Amino acid sequence: MSLAGDLHPHQPEQCGLPDGGAGAGAGGGIGLWSGMVSLLVQSLLAAQCQVTPPGQWPSDYTGDLSEPYDFVVIGAGSAGSVVASRLSENPEWRVLVLEAGGDPPVESELPSLFFGLQHSDFVWNYFTEPSAESCRGMKDGRCYWPRGRMLGGSGAANAMLYVRGNRRDFDGWASMGNPGWGYDDVLPFFERSVTPQGNATHPRGYVTLNPFERHDEDIHRLILAGAQELGVPQVAAFEEGSETGYTHVPGTVRNGQRMSTAKAYLGAVAGTRSNLHVLKNAQVTRLHRDETDPRRVSSVSFEKDGRQHRIEIAKELVLSAGAIDSPALLLRSGIGPRQHLVDLGLSVLVDLPGVGQNLQDHVLVPLFLRLDEGQAKAAAEQEILDDIYNYLVHRKGPLTTPTTASLVAFINTNASSESVYPDTEYHHLFFQRGRHDSLAIFTRGLSFQEQYVERLQDYLRDSHLLCVFVLLSHPLAKGELRLRSPDPREAPILTSNYLTEPEDVATLLRGIGYMEALEQTKAFREHRAELAHIPIEECDKVKVNYRSEEYWRCYAKYFTVTCYHQSGTVKMGSRHDPEACVSPSSLKLHGLSNLRVADASVMPAVVSANTNAATVMIGERAAAFIREEYDHLEKVPPPAPPHMHADGL
C-alpha cells in the first residue's frame, strides 16, 4: 500500500457477489450489504470532493479589461493576496490581481503532502547554477528552488509553519537604514494579520493559526528528552525571553487543511466584493513606463491563454511576485543594473544596481538518524487505509500534519557567545519503517541523486529514519539573480553562493556537532540512534576518521538544501545604500513614483526564522502605506471594527 502515485495498492479478488447484489445461491446476497457498501463508497467520493469545495477560491475574471484599474497587484502569493484584500476593503478602489498560476491542486490542502507539490506544474521549477562548494549530491549538481505558481504562491506549497523571527532580526533591519521597521514597529502588523475580523456579511481577511495535530508522540518525546539532557529547554512559544529552545509552532491550518493567504484573504472575500477581480494563469511579461511621466508605470503586459493583453493603471502597481520573479520582471522591464540590461539588449528605464543582488536564503544540511534498528514497528497497509479514511471523513489523523515538522528548535551553538539569540534552526521529519513512498516523495522533492536515495531506502527497511534539517539562521553568503535572456519563458540565472563564507560553514559544523551530541544522549541511545552513513566517494576518502570535521565539511558540500526562504533581491534601504531598491518609508521602488514591492524580496536581511509570517506582515505594511498616502487625497472608509469569533473565517 502506498501514497505515491507510481505505486498501487493490492487489488483483492472479486468477492463473488452477483451483479446487482441479489443472491441466487451460495455467496450471494439480498442487497442489504451491497447497499451499505455502496453508501460508504458514495460517501467517500463526496468527502473527497469536499476537500476542495467549489467557491473557496476567487473566480477567474472574464469581464471587461479596457478600463484602468486603480491598483494592479502582480502575484496572489503570501503578500500579494494580503495587499489586494486590504485595498479592496475600500469599495471605491478597483483592484486587479494578476496570478501566473491557477487554483492549487487538492494535494496542497493536505499538510502531509507538501513535498509532493515539488517538480509539478504548480511551482516554478528553478535550479541554481552548479557550484564546487555546495549541492553536489543533488541531481546535476544543482540545488532545486521551487516557488509557488498558484493562488497562495509559495504559501500554498510550504510546510505551513508560522514563526515570526525575533527582536534582533527587525531591529537589525532598522539599523541597516530602515527606520520604522524595528521590532516594535512591525509587531502591530503581525498582530493585525492574525486577528480574527469581519463577519459573514462583510468578511475580512486574516491568517488562521492553529496547532497541528501531533502523531508519532514517541518521537516528539525522544527529541525533547535528548535536548533536556543537553540543557536545551522546551519553551511555550518563541517570543521575547524565549528565543532559543524547542517548541511546537502553530501552523496556517484549519480543520486539517492548509490556510494560505489566497484562501484566507482572497477566497474569503472575493464573493462579496465587486471591486476585486482576479485573473488566473496570467503571466506578466513587462511593465511599461508612462510616456508623459517617466517616473510612473502606466500599464503592464501579460499573457493569458496564448494571447497578449495590456492593463492600464490609474493609481499604483504593487509587485508581489516573490524573491525570484519580482527582480526578474523588473529586469525584463528595463529596471536594474545598467550594464546587465545593455548586455541583454534591453532599454534602461531605471538604472538600479541592486535589483537581483543581495540574494539570501537559509541553507541547511540534512542529517539522517536511524532509530530502533531491527526493532522498529513497520507501517501496515491497514493503518495507511485508516489514515486516509480518517482524513476523508473526519479531517483527522497523520495526513493533517507535516509529520514531526511542527517541533522546531532554535539554538545558539557558539559557546563563546552569550547571546540569547540563535545561530541555527532545526526541523524534524520522521519516516516510519517501511514507508518507502513517503521517503520517495521527500527525496524526489529535494532532488537527491538516486544512489543516495537508494541507501536511505535501504536503511528504512529495518529502522525508522529521522531527518533533521540543520539550518543556518544568519547566512553571510549572498548570491545573485541575473537574466539568461529577456524571454520570460527562460528561467533566470540563480547563483546561491552557499557555503562560500567560512563563518557560515563553521556555524553549520557546530550545528552538526550539536546533533552528534544529541545522538549520544541516554534518550537517543535507548532508541539505538545512529547517524546514517551515506556513502559519498569523495568524503569517504578523507584520510582522517569518518565524522571528523573534514568529513562533515565534505558532506555539507554534497548535502546542501534550501529551506525555501529566498529573499533580499529587491532590497529595502535608503538611497545612500548602493544595493537598496525600495524605500523603507513606503516600499516604493527608487526612481518610480507608483510602483511598490511587497514580498520577501524587500527584506534587507533574511529573518532568522521561516519567512512566511514576515512576508505576510510586509503585505499588511504595504497596504497600510497605501491607505495612509491616499487618506488625505480621498476619503478612505475606516476599517470595520474587528468581529471576534472562534470559527476562523
Image (spheres, helix red, strand yellow):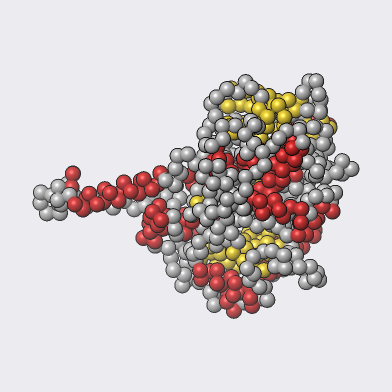
In the picture, measured across the screen, residue 604 lies left or right of residue 87, that is: right
Above or below for 502 versus 547: above
Measuring from the top left, give residue 503's x and y in whole percent: 80, 60
Query: Is residue 493 visible to us here?
Result: no
Of 457 and 35, which appears nearest the observer? Answer: 35
Measuring from the top left, give residue 409's x and y in whole percent: 65, 65
Above or below for 478 versus 530: above
Q: Residue at x 76, y 25 (%)?
A: 289
Q: Residue at x 69, y 49 (%)?
A: 617
Above or below for 109 versus 376: above
Total numbered badges shown on the rendered structure = 0
Measuring from the top left, give residue 60's x and y in whole percent: 53, 31
Q: Residue at x 56, y 43 (%)?
A: 203
Q: Residue at x 60, y 68 (%)?
A: 531
In the picture, measured across the screen, residue 106 lies left or right of residue 505, that is: left
Quadrant into which the N terminus falls: bottom left
Residue lying farthest to the right in this orientation: 576
Query: Is residue 397 visible to us here?
Result: yes
For residue 266, what is the image quadrant?
top right
Above or below for 609 versus 98: below
Measuring from the top left, give residue 59's x and y in whole percent: 52, 34
Of 46 and 528, which appears nearest the observer? Answer: 46
Of 470 and 251, which appears nearest the observer? Answer: 251
For residue 609, what is the image quadrant?
bottom right
